[in-house]
Amino acid sequence: MRQARIVVLGAGVTGLTCAHEIQKKAKASGNAVEVVVLEASGRVGGKILTEIRDGVTYEAGPDSFISLKPQGLELARELGLESSLMPSDPGHTDLFVFSRGRMRRMPAGLKLVVPSRLIPFLMTDVLSWLGKLRVGLEPFIPAGSTEVDESLGQFLRRRLGREALERIAAPLLAGIYAGDPEALSLDSTFPQLREMERQGGLIRSARRKVAGGAKASGGFSMFVSLKGGMSRMTEELRRGLPEGHVVLDSPVTRIERRGEYWRVHAKGGTFTADAVVSTLPAHAAAGVLEEQDLELACVLREIPFASTATASLLFGRKGFPRSLKGYGFIVPRTEGKSISAATYVSSKFPARVPDGKVLVRCFIGGAGREAPALQAEPLIAALARTELGEMLSLGGTEPEHVQVYRWPSSNPQYTVGHAMRLKRIESCVKGHRGLILAGCSYRGVGIPDCIQSGRAAAAKALAALESKQAGVV
């Protein structure tokens, strides 16, 4: 009797988590299920990539995950990495915004982008007094309609005013998605803001949350990483899979249904599968599914993607002209800079940099301002050095090294109407038993979201096997 097989497309954290979960659950149930992971590139990890050079830990993609969502901590513990969990430095928790030509400290007590403490908010110079007054009127603004998918920008402007949107809310929230707040869907990015509005307004809800206590995060700081870098998580996931079951340098060209089975055509060969889990970006999934289902491919292509880049600048601490307090800074679009944000790595995670060094990681690009992120790496490095020097007043201080990573068309944009697109995708997928779509293109872009997506995809794939073996169509 032929052994059941599930083929997973993509060896990012979603795909590897999915394969890990399938193997774990199949073993627990005593079922024999082979799982094969096909990856187009020559490494695992997707957007998670760590490189260590001369004692400096460079992260190309995410450098941490949020502890308030439990999936990241749970997976790390499951993989035996609990002793390697590394919280961010509690002594550097401030965030700054580069506004009107200089760095300004964000007011303490912000919940998402909503002030929960009066005095720090009144004392901040990020907003003008008119801007603060406009935010103060928020509790008296009636809730909007829940029938319409509002843009994030439209919602925040309506609740908090234009100034708070441009200087605080947009660079903080839209920056997570590398998106344009005027295009991002409120319901698909921050639905909790809609719920806060319904519960009496943003400010009242934020103050109630503070009075009720913070959500448990396992005793960790908000941001948690791993000693040795985030790639340890994906490498550990890979090590847990059977030898030869992760096939690298094997891009998938197309998949097709043949009777009771799927045929996956890839550079590494053709694989017969009982179920297929695609964790590819939506536009890449569209390419491999086009011959099987043109309508599904068309809807997948409607999900836009933005391009970004990171530039990590390493300086010697001796002679560095300023003390980098806090986690870093954000830059509103109105400042006209290519850098949208920067992390002070040597302050946030001091263990990642040798003594006597300063490491700053700059984020460049995003929806509506992608051109700088698509330049050649030397040009991105020069741009980052120039703009960072201007914003931090570095004068003639030059970096010892600049490490650049480009991410073309890698950031999904949950634009207005995203929820409806997902319903159309789900409707199409229902007609293809054993086909599961997962990953950051659909319901969350953070590491915990991707882990959750991988686990859910594994459950669906195993359920498809059970229904097939039971003769259910």
Image (cartoon, rainbow, N blue to C red):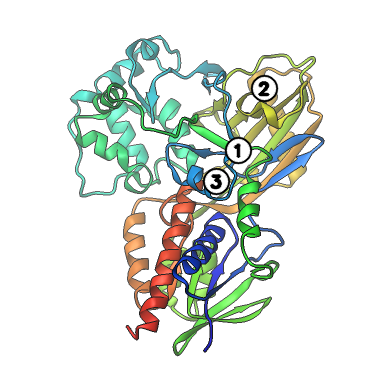
Sequence order check: which comes first, mark 3 or mark 2? 3
Kindly state the secondary structure of the residue where label 1 is placed.
Answer: helix
**Kind of residue at badge 3:** Ala
What x and y, as percent, mark residue 459? 41, 65
Q: In which quarter of the image is the C terminus?
A: bottom left
What x and y, as percent, mark residue 256? 50, 82
Cβ–Cβ below 8 Å for labels 3 and 2? no
Q: Give the distance between the C-alpha atoms of the residues marked 3 and 2, in whole angstroms.
A: 39 Å
Query: Which of the numbered marks, if any, corresponds to residue 63?
Result: none
Q: Name the residue under label 2.
A: 390
**Kind of residue at badge 1:** Ser
- For the question of whether residue 163 can be seen, the reply is no
Q: Residues within 10 Å of mark 1 (few under 14, many from 20)?
A: few
Q: Give the distance between the C-alpha atoms of the residues marked 3 and 1, in whole angstroms.
A: 9 Å
Q: How crowded is mark 3: few (under 14 residues within 10 Å), some or many (20 or more)?
A: many
Quarter assignment of residue 467: bottom left
Q: Give the distance between the C-alpha atoms of the residues marked 1 and 2, in whole angstroms.
A: 40 Å
The mark closer to the camera, 3 or 2, is: 3
141 in relation to 271, above or below: above
Kindly state the secondary structure of the residue where label 2 is placed.
Answer: helix
What x and y, as percent, mark residue 391? 63, 22
Q: Mark 3 points at which residue?
A: 76
Q: Which of 62 and 104 is in front in this view?
A: 62
Residue located at (47% from left, 74% from top)? 31
**Kind of residue at badge 2:** Glu
Kindly state the secondary structure of the residue where label 3 is placed.
Answer: helix
Q: Name the residue under label 1.
A: 83
